[in-house]
Image (cartoon, coloured by chain):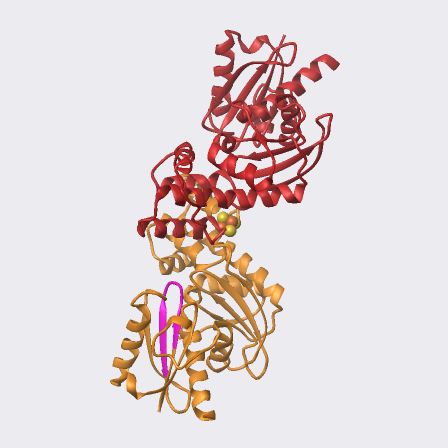
Chain colours: A red, B orange
């Protein structure tokens, strides 16, 4: 029996199919979110990877921003609960989950059983989110993953004095015009996101093991700087982006077992 | 005897020359701030309007971001004190001064004598500052004063849900792509700045007469919406942009009289 979780986010859609053991059997990702073809495409991609059809899915759980308008879902669970659930299985022993997405950043404290105990979140200000990195990457006409490569070449960290994305953008443009080395500027950009994230972590309370999810977790340069700042090892996974969808699939599976 | 005030701001430089009565004799404005040729150009422009030379200035007071690096100044006074001083003379009876500049927004409470009693300020977040309007104007490829003209044609206010400049920018782009009328979108943009400004005003305490200064005061559409929101008449002046420089010139004059 297959169960499915779909995370219809604001900028991307993710789908995870789990097997009878709750292990990930297939994933699907599409770079467009709720209200677009995104969720459907992510679902199709996961189904075709397994060679199965919609009818083969015993239960489907939707999460994320667009969860209430997702066709074909049997249940809806909030993003926060799904993230806690997914992380507990993806990162055994994780107690602090740092999730930096395209438009928000959150820190979840989970109990030993994987239940959500507490969280803090920033979804009002672009600073400290993936959007901040998007804005910066567009200055260098590169991708966000190129930023990580630049960071690896940095000799020093050129601090950015403004926390605001808009003012920081001007600062970065002016540093670039001064001919300062791009890797050192990028290190400063990452340090800015790290400061914001560390602030959220401290407010939430930091307990090891710390795991990182969301698109920004793939940025190794930033992740390393955050680990150093927080004084804790930070684990992640190539599947970290699917954490919310994974949690949703696990909820679908539990629902099925209970029924 | 002439006295001069120079406001070396972050994005523009302003100069005011006052006569023996403390009345404005000449002004100079240049669209570049501290650390550029801006302050010098603003000074030259005011001097040449009067047909006088630097030597004819009995005392020169500098204010603004770049006041400590301004050549030729005899004294420096903080921006806040200069704004309070200038407003007391420019707007007799004003007790609340709303100043929205290119990079910050502040509300000053002044006593009957024009002394600064209290203030609140936002210089960390681009939302609610002139910078927010710059970002929006660039979407419509128009100037900030064109925004005021658009607002006058609005039939309704299309609210913007994000307060963050970066997220609001995306919202406005998407409203434009949906074919919504530009005047109604612009009314929503102004309403967003008004909400932020009104928040500062409430924190500072609102006492009539309310006067508005800074570059954004010239935006009539926004000013009218703020007056409506605050439930108070808001006065301004074409010289409002020079308020800080005017206050500095008045300090220079007082210094001379005392000496
Ligand atoms: S500080 Fe900058 S990035 Fe943050 S809400 Fe304000 S405008 Fe947006």
In this view, B35 is above or below A242: below
In this view, A17 is above or below B99: above
Q: Residue at x 40, y 67 (%)?
A: B9
Query: For this rendering, which residue is in front, A88 or A43?
Result: A88
Residue B226 image offset from top left, x and y in percent = 52, 63
Location of the N terminus of chain A (image quadrant): top right
Query: For this rendering, which residue is in front, A102 or A239?
Result: A239
Location of the C terminus of chain A (image quadrant): top right
Residue A68 image offset from top left, x and y in percent = 60, 28
Residue B158 image offset from top left, x and y in percent = 49, 48
Query: For this rendering, which residue is in front, A131 or A176?
Result: A176
Residue A37 image offset from top left, x and y in percent = 46, 24
Q: Which residues are magenta?
A: B6-17
Horizontal side of B35 relative to A148 (left or right) equals left
Q: Residue at x 41, y 36 (%)?
A: A147
In this view, B21 is above or below A131: below
Residue placed furthest toward the front: A155
Q: Quadrant of residue A2?
A: top right
Q: Residue at x 32, y 52 (%)?
A: A178
Is residue A221 at all visible to an observer of this figure?
yes
Is residue B241 at all visible to an observer of this figure?
no
């Amino acid at each position: 029996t297959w169960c499915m979780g779909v995370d219809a986010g604001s900028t991307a859609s993710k789908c995870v199919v789990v097997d009878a053991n709750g292990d990930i059997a297939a994933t699907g990702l599409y770079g467009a979110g709720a209200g677009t073809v995104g969720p459907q495409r992510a679902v199709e991609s996961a189904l075709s990877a397994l060679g199965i059809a919609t009818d083969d899915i015993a239960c489907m759980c939707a999460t994320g921003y667009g969860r209430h308008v997702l066709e074909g879902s049997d249940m809806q669970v909030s993003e926060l609960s799904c993230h806690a659930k997914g992380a507990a299985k993806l990162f055994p022993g994780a107690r602090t989950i740092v999730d930096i997405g395209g438009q928000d950043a959150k820190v979840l404290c989970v109990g030993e059983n994987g239940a959500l105990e507490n969280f803090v979140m920033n979804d009002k200000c672009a600073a400290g989110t993936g959007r901040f990195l998007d804005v910066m990457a567009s200055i260098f006409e590169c991708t966000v993953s190129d930023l990580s490569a630049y960071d690896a070449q940095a000799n020093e960290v050129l601090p950015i004095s403004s926390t605001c994305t808009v003012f920081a953008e001007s600062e970065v443009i002016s540093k670039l015009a001064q001919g300062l080395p791009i890797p050192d500027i990028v290190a400063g950009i990452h340090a800015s996101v790290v400061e914001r994230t560390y602030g959220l972590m401290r407010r939430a309370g930091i307990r090891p093991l710390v795991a990182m999810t969301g698109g920004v977790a793939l940025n190794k340069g930033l992740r390393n700087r955050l680990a150093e700042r927080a004084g804790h090892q930070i684990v992640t996974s190539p599947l970290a982006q699917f954490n919310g969808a994974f949690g949703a699939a696990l909820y679908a599976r539990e629902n099925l077992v209970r029924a």
